Image (cartoon, rainbow, N blue to C red):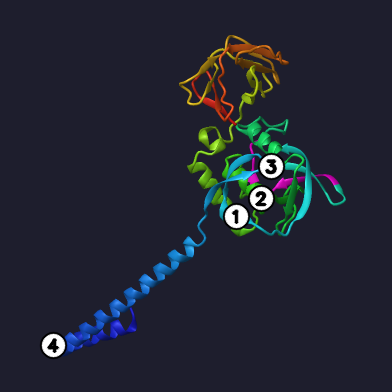
Amino acid sequence: MSKHVLLFSFVATHYAKNGKCVIIAQAQKMVRKEMVRMRKYILLLVAIFALFTSSFAITYTNMKIYDSTLTYAATFAYQTLNASAATVVRVKDGGTIVVDIATLTNFTIKLTGVETPEDVDPSKPVQFYSLEAASFTKHMLTGKRVYLAYDTSKYGVFGRTLAYVWIKSGDKYVMFNALLIINGYGKYYPTYKFRKDYMDLFAEFQQYAQEQNMGMWKEPSMVGKAISLTIAKIDYSAKDEYVQIKNVSNQQINLKGWKIASEPADKQTFAFPDITLQPGESVYVHTGPNAGANKLPGINIVWTKKYIWDDNGDACVLIDPSGNIVDNYKY
């Protein structure tokens, strides 16, 4: 309470004891005026705070990037950028690329602030959604021109070069690190600090991906977990469609009780027979009028002579014998 309010309260009390009712009424009136003035100040501060925070709100939109339509933060795209141009020659995993830049060739770049599921370290098990993340980065970046920007610290704890990787979408630059997180191919990785404004944004991006069930967040209980079987590919373009299921573990796996299903899962489901996949081996489940005509290396099975996979986009889930969805593949 202000000094004026305390003073008038004191005066009112003092004169009340001496029977000065007129003075008390005047004091009370001034107290009320002071309270009204304070209330106006508080409302003004609230309005200013609301205006300030709304001006920094993140707006998400669908954006055409190369041949893909992806979700991105429209407020995080720029027409000018201070960065070094490079060409991606190879993708190691979802968050690691190899580039040619200036006089350097085959230079490895780790994307700053993002962690994608593990699939290349032979000492570690393959994690859920790792192949999808790697396939996404390969599709988006291999052979493409990218623009590298660095943080105050250019190197990570393992001596790897860290960078923000920007790509062009029309006349604007968008950050690929952010694309991975927003679309559920990677997680915000705050273990090693980077610029504070980007850390706050990346955290917001992951929250959005989780709330919208993007990518790996469609099965949040599987995020970070090791997997043994994965949906490696869906070929939907020919009269002999197929789904490739690959054993990514170091043990043989019997497929009896496993299923694949198109989404929603209750529409079209295929149950695997009693067959065993060796480590690294694949099984191909064929559909379409010419199902089985294309014999691929591994085990080939015909599901149906009907088309299953929609040319305009579809999804497949892999279900273990306990009924758990252990992988999903969307195109």
Q: In the figure, 37 relative to 88: above or below? A: below
State the extent of the magenta-drawn residues as a range.
Answer: 105-118
Q: CA distance from mark 4 to mark 1?
A: 64 Å
Q: Secondary structure at mark 1?
A: helix
Please report contact status of discs 4 and 3: CB closer than 8 Å, yes or no. Answer: no
Residue at 29% x, 82% y is 6
Q: Magenta residues: mostly which secondary structure?
A: strand
Q: In the figure, 139 relative to 208: above or below? A: above
Q: Which of the two marks, 4 or 2, is nearer to us in this view?
A: 2
Is 109 one of the magenta-colored residues? yes
Label 2 belongs to which residue? 170
Q: Which of the two marks, 1 or 2, is nearer to us in this view?
A: 2
Q: Which of the two marks, 3 or 1, is nearer to us in this view?
A: 1
Q: Quadrant of residue 259?
A: top right
Q: CA distance from mark 1 to mark 2?
A: 14 Å
Upstream in sequence: badge 3 or badge 1:
1
Label 4 belongs to which residue? 21
Which mark identifies residue 76?
1
Which mark identifies residue 269?
none
Q: CA distance from mark 3 to mark 1?
A: 20 Å
